[in-house]
Amino acid sequence: MTARQAADRLNRSPITIRQWARRYQARALGRAGREIVYDFDDIATIEGCIWRGDDIPPTPEQRDELRNQLGRAA
């Protein structure tokens, strides 16, 4: 999902999504024209950690594990 698409779904600005992606090394899946396509689950996990006030795991793999843990707890 591009930064613009993720921003629409998360009610954020595209620049915020791009900043998070750069700051937290979000998983990039490729390109759509000139835009980078990000793993939306990874971006959403970063947003969730920020919203909850949790530390953000430093790698996409650690964020995958966090998502799995949160999913099992639900």
Image (cartoon, grey):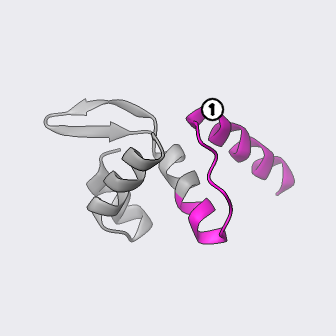
Q: Nearer the viewer, residue 28 or 54?
A: 54
Give the overall secondary structure of the magenta segment.
Answer: helix
The answer to whether residue 29 is left or right of residue 24 is left
Find out whether residue 57 is within the magenta segment: yes
Find out whether residue 58 is within the magenta segment: yes
User: How many marks do you count on the picture?
Assistant: 1
The answer to whether residue 49 is left or right of residue 19 is right
Q: Mark 1 is on which residue type?
A: Glu
Tell me residue 42's x, y (percent).
Answer: 52, 44
- Residue lying at the far right of the rendered structure: 73
Does residue 69 lie above or below 54 as drawn? above
In the rendered structure, which segment of residues is drawn in magenta? 47-74
Tell me residue 58's x, y (percent).
Answer: 59, 42
Q: Secondary structure under badge 1?
A: helix
Does residue 8 lie above or below 31 as drawn? below
Q: Which residue is mark 1?
A: 61
Q: Nearer the viewer, residue 27 or 19?
A: 19
Structural crowding at the residue carrying mark 1, measured as other residues with C-alpha within 10 Å and reported as few (<14), some (14–19) or many (≥20)? few
- Residue lying at the far left of the rendered structure: 34
